[in-house]
Amino acid sequence: MLVAAGNEGGFRAAAISWRCRMALKRRMIAGIDDIEAVTFLCSTCKARTTIPAASLIDVPQQCTACNSEWWRANEFTSNESTSGPAGMALVQAIRTLMAMIQEGEDRFRILLEFES
């Protein structure tokens, strides 16, 4: 806020005040090798399960807190979602997860942990 008042050269300066609102955005760019851990957030109870990236093998089948089922072994015929390179599969998976979240069909969310 700026306030100015005075009498200069016979003219009286009026008080001026205003507020300035500023939006601050911060972005972080990280590579896959920067991921320290993967956290799974249960959509039912909001509990979190964190697994170090080096120990990550698969998505847990159920929530460790409420036992809500996240996926069944017979739901998938293969672990590969595309015949292309892993990078393409990752992009496809991100798009699918975003669509599931928007439609409210996600059973869990994936959160990535980075070293700051």
Image (tube, rainbow, N blue to C red):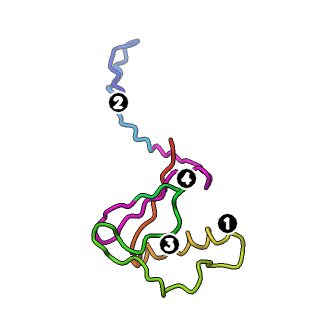
Horizontal arrangement in the rendering, residue 87 relative to residue 4 (left or right)? right
Residue pictured at 46% horizontal, 76% vertical = 100
Pair 2/4: label in front:
4
- Going from the N terminus, do you reach mark 4 or mark 1 first? 4
Q: Which residue is mark 3?
A: 97
Q: Which mark is residue 60?
A: none
Q: Quick check: is 101 in the magenta stretch?
A: no
Q: Quadrant of the N terminus?
A: top left
Q: Which residue is mark 2?
A: 1
Q: Which residue is mark 4?
A: 35
Residue pictured at 30% horizontal, 74% vertical = 67
- Going from the N terminus, do you reach mark 3 or mark 1 first? 1
| Number of other residues with Cα within 10 Å of mark 2, as a class: few under 14, some 14 to 19, many 20 or more | few
User: Which SS class for mark 3?
Assistant: helix
User: Which SS class for mark 1?
Assistant: helix
Pair 4/3: label in front:
4
- Going from the N terminus, do you reach mark 2 or mark 4 first? 2
Horizontal arrangement in the rendering, residue 25 relative to residue 93 (left or right)? left
- Residue type for callout 2: Met
Pair 3/1: label in front:
1
Please provide percent x and percent y for residue 76. 53, 84
